[in-house]
Amino acid sequence: MADLRVEIAGVSFKNPVIPASGAFGFGHEYEKLYPLSKLGGISVKGMTLNQKDGNPPPRIAETPMGMLNSVGLQNPGIDYFLEKELPYLAGKETRIIANVAGSTVEDCVTMVKKIEGSAVDMIELNISCPNVKQGGAAFGTSCESAAGITAAVRKATTKPLMVKLSPNVTDITAIAKAVESEGADAVSLINTLLGMRIDINSRRPVLKNNVGGMSGPAVFPIAVRMVWQVANAVQIPVVGMGGISSAEDAIEMMMAGASAVQVGAAIFTDPYAPVKIIDGISSWLDCKGIASVKDIVGTVQPW
Ligand code: SIN
């Protein structure tokens, strides 16, 4: 059987498949379907310093081959996670990635300091959040603010630091290089693409928040393109996500340059998707006679 192990920022994962933040909660519902130990890791729901109820409904809408969400970071807060959720997850023999989503640099710094002595294996800094002290534009939409928040968080933690990039930018490679230069150990991409739908009878947006983040198979080619561009622009590992729903998609993303993949929207249509993708990668590697999944990373041969 092919070797599925990968390493990202010094952390070893038993396989390269990780349920994406926001698509898997803290794992409870899925543990009823399969052992969480099957997964390479789990990126938990994006957390803020204090508990958040999120946006009012409707906050999820289907789109052709995808979905729009404006959940608004509903989460129980970092203290609840550390006290109540982490002890449960820590016994599951999978890597735990804490997705940190603050609306100020100070909030993010406070959160990673709280996480420092815990069983969390890696921090995923979500820079798609609005920077409330600088007019509300997301941290991840300018090199300056992306670099600034990365530098501050880097100083505050010794945990491996992965920065999750927003695709809602002109040049994602510039943002990736900015966070790399401030000490990010890895980058993950793509977060959702900003979108909007309108109900033509009521003339109201379908989401109460008017706009939301689009994910699902429709965004997959955009994600592959951005992962390929970023993997060629930085030296640190890239974790690819955005519309992955099959083993073939995961393999394609890894050939584009991803060392591992995250699976998000596909879990809402098939909660077994991550496990099926792990098994499918393994079968494909065996079928092709490839000894290790690491051997396919970045192997696309551009024309
Ligand atoms: C949300 O909870 O609104 C999604 C967060 C994100 O896309 O980073």
Image (spheres, rainbow, N blue to C red):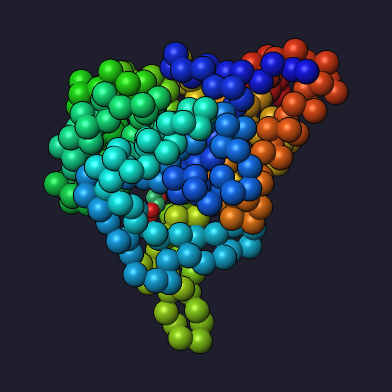
- Quarter of the image where one finds residue 83: top left
Left or right of residue 67: residue 104: left
Q: Nearer the viewer, residue 159 or 245?
A: 159
Q: Nearer the viewer, residue 130 or 2?
A: 2
Identity of the residue drawn at 36% across and 21% down = 160
- Looking at the rendered image, the quarter that the C terminus falls into is top right
| Residue 196, position as x, y percentages in the image | 46, 65
- Quarter of the image where one finds residue 143: top left
| Residue 212, position as x, y percentages in the image | 42, 60
Identity of the residue drawn at 16% across and 46% down = 134
Identity of the residue drawn at 49% across and 36% down = 42
Identity of the residue drawn at 22% across and 32% down = 114
Residue 223 visible (yes or no):
no
Q: Nearer the viewer, residue 224 or 110?
A: 110
| Residue 278, position as x, y percentages in the image | 68, 32
- Quarter of the image where one finds residue 56: bottom left
Left or right of residue 105: residue 213: right
